[in-house]
Image: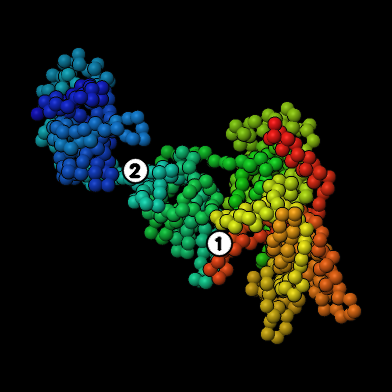
Amino acid sequence: MQTSVTPDAISTVLSNPSFDSSSDRSEIVVQVVDLKPIGNRYTFSANDGKTKVKAMFTASLTPEIISGNIQNLGLIRLIDFSVNDISSKSTKYFLVTKCEAVASPLDSEINLESKREEEGSEHKKQKLDHSPVNDVKMDVSTGITLKPKQDFVAKSASQIMTEQRGNAAPAARMSMTRRVHPLVSLNPYQGNWTIKVRVTNKGVMRNYKNARGEGCVFNVELTDEEGTQIQATMFNDAARKFYDRFLLGKVYYISRGSLKLANKQFKTVQNDYEMTLNENSEVEEASNEEMFVPETKFNFVPIEELGLYVNQKELIDLIGVVQSVSPTMSIRRRTDNEMIPKRDITLADESKKTVVVSLWNDLATGIGQELLDMADESPVIAIKSLKVGDFQGVSLSTISRSNVVINPESPEAKKLKSWYDSEGKETSMSSIGSGMSPSAKNGSRSMYTDRVLLSHITSNPSLGEEKPVFFSTRAYISFIKPDQTMWYQACKTCNKKVTEALDSGYWCEGCQKKYEECSLRYIMAVKVTDSTGETWISSFNDEAEKILGCSADELNKLRSEEGEVNEYQTKLKEATWSSHLFRISVTQNEYNGEKRQRVTVKGVSPVDFAAESRLLLQDISNKNKASH
């Protein structure tokens, strides 16, 4: 029986794909290194003393490993194997289908290069050969020290793994027994997997109540070593089990979770899938593992393009130079009357635009105070997950999962800081909100972009079928139906619909309170017309007030007044045949099994005739260029 590895065997096989004769293969002896179970198979590295290559035993050899015949650091002779490519890498591996053990486990990996110096030590060899205590044999040609045969003790694979893992921490044991999958490789149809990730964002525990009952939920954002992110959500028992276990910045091994397509409405990271963990999922902190620092991935939106995201569900990332920082202020939250801290900061970027970002809660008192102390230095900050609102045209607010990084070490930050130091600090800046005048709430750009005629909407019945689409248009109010339901009774605190209480007053389901008074808010349909056609549009309170020039409460008083002149009808007629700029959304609603277009007003502005003239001149110029 051969008791040494075959020198240069692996490099010979890899360099000669036709190395295929069984006579040659019978002489290949390698050492088994890093023996690990993968499912019902075992992987290892085949070592010939100079070169190592990844290898795998077929399932038919698993009993040999479990019985202890084949062991880690032992020697095996390869009888039948094939050389295969790893598809994702330009490397090869051995698939071993038949082999036999030729020596018991050695003390360490074989390294022929480091053993060469021992070849000339003949007296040391003789001393070892005749030692009554050690009775150890050494192969002079390879420098391999072999244990005596009588010391060979068969050990099962479970015994080997137990000895190797004996004093390891739980997370370390998991890493030794399971292959870690990168997040990018996961999909809903995959079986068992284990990931190693850092918690880069942790949401707050939220309580909810719906038709199925009450519960609690929270989510975390996880990032692996490659920088890939995924959102994991936990409900009820799982939320209570893992909320305290997940700590921001810590690294964990996670397994036994499930994946599904991400809900775009609640998605916070760039991943097509989202993860759900239940009470049976496994989460172990990698406390003794080599830590990695995943790259926080940002998808920055320039300030001048923020108008596209106003009042949309999509969150954005922003980078900017701090221009000013306000003191902390306290704001009363309408839902529960709790006082919460808020701080406004003004940011600028290379588009020479500025925007106000509102920091809330801990970000206002923590990061906000730090920014106030260093405001004179004009630091660069990157903020992940901001909500875009329409206050003063465009405004930004942090949410519970927002993350603020001061002076990040990124190419974008260095470029922005360089621009600001060289020319930006002397440049005149303008607010993005004022740059959108006339502004379009709920999202979108200036009234002078995406301009269409009404015929574009009415002649395309499939518009808005997959998702809402937004346009700007200029049209006249041609008719307001006087006998329609033009308003609803609303709570003065939250603006939600109220119902009349049994005794007196009004009950708000949203606030769970009774109020003595309520207000009226518009839900009005109007017909609009331009030179190409007409259509009905739905208008809510703020937009309807601009169209009619009065509040719903005021119009209701006119409706109830008696006299020779119907002031209510007069007010509606005054609003007709006036021209407005509209920002509209087009969606598809189903009514009695039939899909219909729903056009909703998102913003109303008076016509700026100077701007309209510039738009017409630009259209003429574009058509002239196209004709040449």
Above or below, comparing residue 141 to residue 467 in the picture: above
Q: Is residue 400 left or right of residue 127?
A: right
Residue 269 image position (x, y, % from top left): 53, 48
Going by the picture, which residue comes out furthest to the front? 627
Query: In which quadrant is the N terminus drawn?
Result: top left
Does the image show residue 438?
yes
Query: Residue flagged by tag 1: what amino acid is it?
Result: Arg
Above or below, comparing residue 606 to residue 125 in the picture: below
> Closer to the N terminus: mark 1 or mark 2?
2
Above or below, comparing residue 486 to residue 448 in the picture: below
Residue 386 image position (x, y, % from top left): 63, 49
Query: In which quadrant is the C terminus drawn?
Result: top right
Residue sitting at x 66%, y 66% = 335
Query: Residue flagged by tag 2: what amino acid is it?
Result: Arg
**10 Å neighbourhood of mark 1: few (<14), some, or many (≥20)?**
few
Q: To which residue does mark 2 refer?
A: 179
Q: Splitting the image into 4 quarters, where does residue 288 fall?
A: top left
**Helix, strand, or loop for circle 1?**
strand
Residue sitting at x 26%, y 33% = 84
Q: To which residue does mark 1 refer?
A: 206
> Which of 627 and 181 lies nearest the eye of the viewer?
627
> Which of 337 and 39 lies nearest the eye of the viewer?
39
Q: Splitting the image into 4 quarters, where does residue 544 fall?
A: bottom right
Residue 15 image position (x, y, % from top left): 26, 22
Q: Is residue 342 left or right of residue 227?
A: right
Residue 402 image position (x, y, % from top left): 60, 49
> Which of 157 and 417 lies nearest the eye of the viewer?
417
Residue sitting at x 74%, y 41% = 619
Disc sitting over residue 45 in the figure: none
